[in-house]
Every structure is written in C-alpha cells, then in structure tokens.
Amino acid sequence: MLPASSSLVHRRSVGDASIVQLSDGAVRHGPAQAFFGLNADVASFEAVSQASNLSSDVFDFPATATLIETDNERVLIDAGHGFRNRPSAGQLMNALEEAGVQPETISHVVLTHLHCDHVGGLLDESGRPIFINASHRVSPLEHAYWTGLGSNTSVGLVVQNLVKALGRKLTFIAPGEELVQGVSVVDSAGHTPGHLCVLVESKGDRLLVAGDLANHPIWAITRPNWHMSLDVDPVKAACSRCKILGWLADEKVPMAGYHMPFPALGTIERDAENFRYVPEVS
Ligand SMILES: [Zn+2]
C-alpha cells in the first residue's frame, strides 16, 4: 500500500474518485511585485506582504499537477515545467513514479492553459510525447491565441513545437463539456484567453482544479483584484478570480491551486471584501 502523502505525492478522495497531487517542485522568482500586485502601490504591497510575513524580494513559486483516478480513467491536469527547469522544478515524472503511476496508463491530459510551466512536461528531451496513450485536451480559444502568435513569443514558440509533436493527440474541449463522467471543464478566461478550470464531482462531493485562476494564497487570493504580470488580460483575470473564488466560498467547494504551497489543496472563505485561503490539513 502506497503512503497517502510523501514529499512529492499527496492523495485524497472526491466521492469515488481518487485525487493525486503531484509536486513538480518550485522555481524561485523575485522581486515579488514584478509578478503580483502590478496595480498596487509599493506601500500597500509591502503592508500586505509584511502582515503575512512574506518577503517581497524573492519567493518560491511551486507547481503541483493533479491526477484524477476514476474506475476506468486516469486524467492528468497539467504537466509541470519539464526538463528545462530541473532540478528545482520539472519533477512530475519523479512524482508519478513515487505514486506508482506509469505515464502510458494516463488516458487523458487536460491543459488548463498553454503557459510553459503547465505544458513543459508533456514532451521528453527529444521532443517526443510522454503520455503516449492519452488524449490531450485544450480550449479552442487557448489554442487559437497562442498558435496565432506563431514563434513571435517564447510561449508561442513552445506551443508551436508542442502542437507539431502532439499531432492528432491534441484535441479541443470547450467550457461546460464533460471529459469523462464527473470531470468537466469551466470557463475561467483572463489569465490566458482560454484558461479552463476542471470540476470533479462524485457522489455529491466536489473539487475544483483551478489551474492559474489565483496564483498566490496572499497576493492573489486576499487581493483578487491585484493584477499579475503573466495575466494576458488582467482585468478579465480579476473578474474570473472574484467570481469563481466567490462560488468556491459560497458552495464550500475545495480547490486544488496549481501554484499554492504543496499539497496545493485548500478552501476559500469570504473575508470582508476579499477572500482567505485555508490550506487543507494533510
Ligand atoms: Zn502557472
């Protein structure tokens, strides 16, 4: 029997489905206000950071992919940084090995969006697909946006190579569509034009795999209207963040947040005008 939790793997259930949180490691960035709170003044950003004992110089940006296991399917949500960011990140393959999951047994990969820290782990160092038996699903809007940029941006170039390598393994999924029973995708555009969250439902139990809806427990969740440098449309991103965080709080649906501290599971509570992230006890 595998342990419920280790350095790279954490398990919980949602009804009959099993959720496996797979750490991809972390990347160090800084200064923090080059990424978060772009529309906040320096004093406010410092005050919010200090109140939570956060350094605004450097911060570790963790990444955690989610595997949903049902009776018949294994659905991986996002795939980490891949080999380019090793050794601090790009640990998904080690996490899968620790979880006892062979990449060829994954039946579907859902991409919340096409940023490099979510798709880098789809191809090996030779550019070949790793999840060889999986359908890879992305929003048509997301696909159109990044392929439309061609090789003019670093993300566009990565996407161009990815689309070529995946070929017919890459197909679309639109908001509201159910991928397999109990696993559907939800529109959360803003961070990127076709950003998707993934809702898991089983036996009245629910969990939202939120991707990059909110990328920090303090700088994004307690201040959902703060803009982030990686948001393609920061105003729309803030709108999606407020709307969906409000829904999670009101419906008491927990979330898996890709950039939350591992195991990246928590609940959202309303806090005056804003929200609070409460990590799930492991
Ligand atoms: Zn990300």
Image: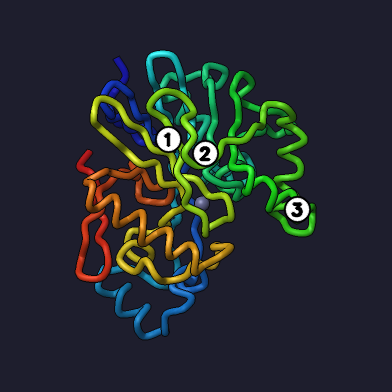
Position of the N terminus by quadrant? top left
Please give the residue where the numbered disc 2 appears in the rendered image: 78
Figure check: 135 above or below 192: above
In-image side of 249 versus 147 (left or right)? left
Name the residue at 69% across, 51% down.
Answer: 146
Question: Residue 108: x and y, percent?
Answer: 54, 26
Question: Residue 239: x and y, percent?
Answer: 42, 64
Question: Residue 240: x and y, percent?
Answer: 43, 58
Figure check: 159 above or below 109: below
Query: What amino acid is at disc 3?
Result: Gly
Please give the residue where the numbered disc 1 appears in the rendered image: 66
Badge 1 marks a residue whose secondary structure is strand
218 and 72: which is toward the camera: 72
Image quadrant in which you'd find residue 21: top left
Query: What amino acid is at disc 2?
Result: Asp
168 and 128: which is toward the camera: 168
| Among the two numbered marks 1 and 2 on one chain, the one whose residue lies closer to the N terminus | 1
Residue contact between numbered discs 1 and 2, judged by CB atoms under 8 Å: yes
Please give the residue where the numbered disc 3 appears in the rendered image: 148
Which of pointers 3 and 2 indicates the residue nearer the eye? 3
| Among the two numbered marks 3 and 2 on one chain, the one whose residue lies closer to the N terminus | 2
| Among the two numbered marks 1 and 3 on one chain, the one whose residue lies closer to the N terminus | 1
Q: CA distance from mark 1 to mark 3?
A: 28 Å
Position of the C terminus by quadrant? top left
Query: What amino acid is at disc 1?
Result: Thr
